[in-house]
Image (cartoon, rainbow, N blue to C red):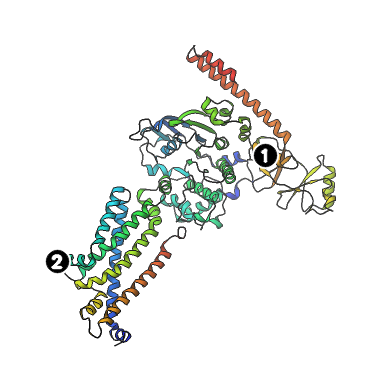
Amino acid sequence: MSFWEYVRTTHQQLLTDAYQHASVVFQCMVVATALGVLIGVTTYRSAWAGNVATTAGSMLLTIPSLAMIGLLIPLVGLGVPPTVIALTLYGLLPVVRNAIVGLRGVDPALTEAARGIGMSRLARLLRVELPLAWPPILTGIRVSTQMLMGIAAIAAYASGPGLGNEIFRGIASLGSANALNQVLAGTVGIIILALLFDAAYVLIGRLTISRGIRA
Amino acid sequence: MPDAPPASPPPAASPGDGDGSAAGRRSDSHGATIELEALTKRYPGSGAPAVDNVNMEIRAGETVIFVGPSGCGKSTTLKMINRLIEPSGGRIRIGGEDVTDIDPVRLRRKVGYAIQSSGLFPHMTVAQNIGLVPRMTGWRKTRIKERVEEMLDLVGLDPGEFLGRYPRQLSGGQQQRVGVARALAADPPVLLMDEPFGAVDPITRDHLQDELIRLQQELHKTIVFVTHDFDEAIKLGDRIAVLRERSHIAQFDTPEAILTNPADDFVSGFVGAGAALKRLNLSRVRDVEITDIPTVTVDTPLQQIFNSLRASGTSEILLLDRNHRPYKWLRRGDLMRAKGSLARAGTLVTDTVTRDATLRDALEAVLTDSSGRAAVTGRRGEYIGVVDMETLMNSVHELLEEDRLEALEHQHDLETTRSAQTHAEQEGGDAGGRKA
């Protein structure tokens, strides 16, 4: 059976897997972004706290994803929970780091001007600092998403959702007629999803980054 | 809270040219007094205070310039007025109210703040930047919009063109204007300016200074302005505080008094050479006699132009364009040589001065203009009159004479106080008297 024939016959299953893959990455990214920006906002003003946050994130990232999911199974069981926890943790670092870098990169003259014209701490953060730090934060989110696309495939190891199932099934039945097709379908699916997400981020950037600071 | 309606008159109703005092009376004085009492800033870990025991009273509607060498604490002193830097000791009173311990955000909404390189937020449009403070204080949308347009008009930018622009689409001078507009948007009684024109080129700086003078004639805010440029201080200040290290006040007086009667070597060193020339910066064209010369416009029939030329005692007449702006100097014979063509005859007017221009600018214009006089123009560039060398010389002689008398009087006062203080210091007063 050729690759195209395989895709045609199993497209229902592939679409479901792809949808679940995209869905889990998207939801984890939302949580990771919220958490990451929050961590960035609370730590960027102190050199010490900011460095701790970034270092902790880097350390998390060095844990092999397979090991991370494996370690989570005894704690939270199989299926969706270990997938979501692992993906969120991996997604944090680029967002945290770029949030800290972005917020620290805001021209001090501007924050002082904001103070000088009578903006409260919260107003300065929401109206001046975060909008100015948003481009690097968005880049962080983009990098995170790309990374999670690949890592999410590993989730199938813990019976998680997504295109990883396709790949794992292929690997488990190596030598059989459709083994290669399965691995290929899963991989190509992930690449396509990653490209679609990237296109979406370009659009989001267009819509949310002020024309005044767009490169 | 900005309870008052916009202070400045609607732009359409503003006077054609610099009749500033009348405009000032129409837009009631909005300034507030500022009193600094034993104001001190001490940074932890450093022995000597950065600002040491500053006492100063600034009158409502007055422009006071802090001038001094780098690192003398002038900027720190300014930032303590809106408590961007919290004082370690002393009191600040604005309009009689002690603001040393009130919520700094509330304080800063009453105190406009403009800084070097404008401090505009690059991600906001001009309109959003200017409307920021009014929006935070809860103005209605329509009122904010009106106010933003009014402010742009006030600083000489066309609202239609600039409202939607981002700061990076503006020149340095335009950014600075918007910065001032933002600082004034909520109509604060006090305006603090921290070297606002430090980062623009000299020509633009000159324009901005003129604009500020015009603005202040309309608005009568209390302005505290920091600069290290003494010439800028002379040009803008009602009074100048010359500061030395740790913000000690070396002299706090009118520009005239500082120029003619510097308190000590530090001040005279800072004033620099050419005090007499600098004195020219302190008087404006409006203060001297403006003479009239015969004018014709480009629409005047040629025959009439010939007649005017022949009739004029001066051998020159001024040709105005359709908007009554000075266009060309015409001398006898010019028209002949150009074979009756107005387009080719005469020499172009290269330099004009407004009534707000300083005598120094006027002198410059007179020296460079081929006819030895400079045309004086109104706000829209229309012809008002001319100044020439003779008028300038006479005025300057009068001014210097007045200054000399004033300085003598000042010196005399000083002597009296000193002799009253101690008998021994009477000789010191005599020594000072000789200097004048």
Considering only vertical position in the picture, is B350 above or below A22? above
Amino acid type at mark 1: Glu
Instruction: State left or right for residue B391 relative to residue A119.
Output: right
Q: Secondary structure at mark 2?
A: helix
- Say which residue label 1 marks: B364
- Say which residue label 2 marks: A74
Rate crowding at label 1 as few (under 14), some (14 to 19) or many (20 or more) other CA atoms within 10 Å. some
Mark 1 → mark 2, Cα distance in angstroms: 88 Å
Q: Chain of mark 2?
A: A
Q: Secondary structure at mark 1?
A: helix
Instruction: State left or right for residue A149 relative to residue B314.
Output: left
Q: Position of residue A87 (x, y in %)?
A: 26, 66
Tally of numbered tags: 2
Amino acid type at mark 2: Pro
Residue with the most extreme top position: B423
> Picture quarter containing residue B299?
bottom right
Q: Nearer the viewer, residue B46 or B96?
A: B46
Considering only vertical position in the picture, is B153 above or below B229? below
| Residue drawn at the location 28% of the way across and 84% of the way down | A10
The N terminus of chain A sits in image quarter? bottom left
Q: Position of residue B257 (x, y in %)?
A: 57, 27
Q: Nearer the viewer, residue A71 or B140?
A: A71
Residue with the most extreme front position: A175
Q: Same chain, marks 1 and 2?
A: no
Considering only vertical position in the picture, is B243 above or below A123? above
Instruction: State left or right for residue B384 relative to residue B108.
Output: right
Q: Position of residue A157 (x, y in %)?
A: 20, 72
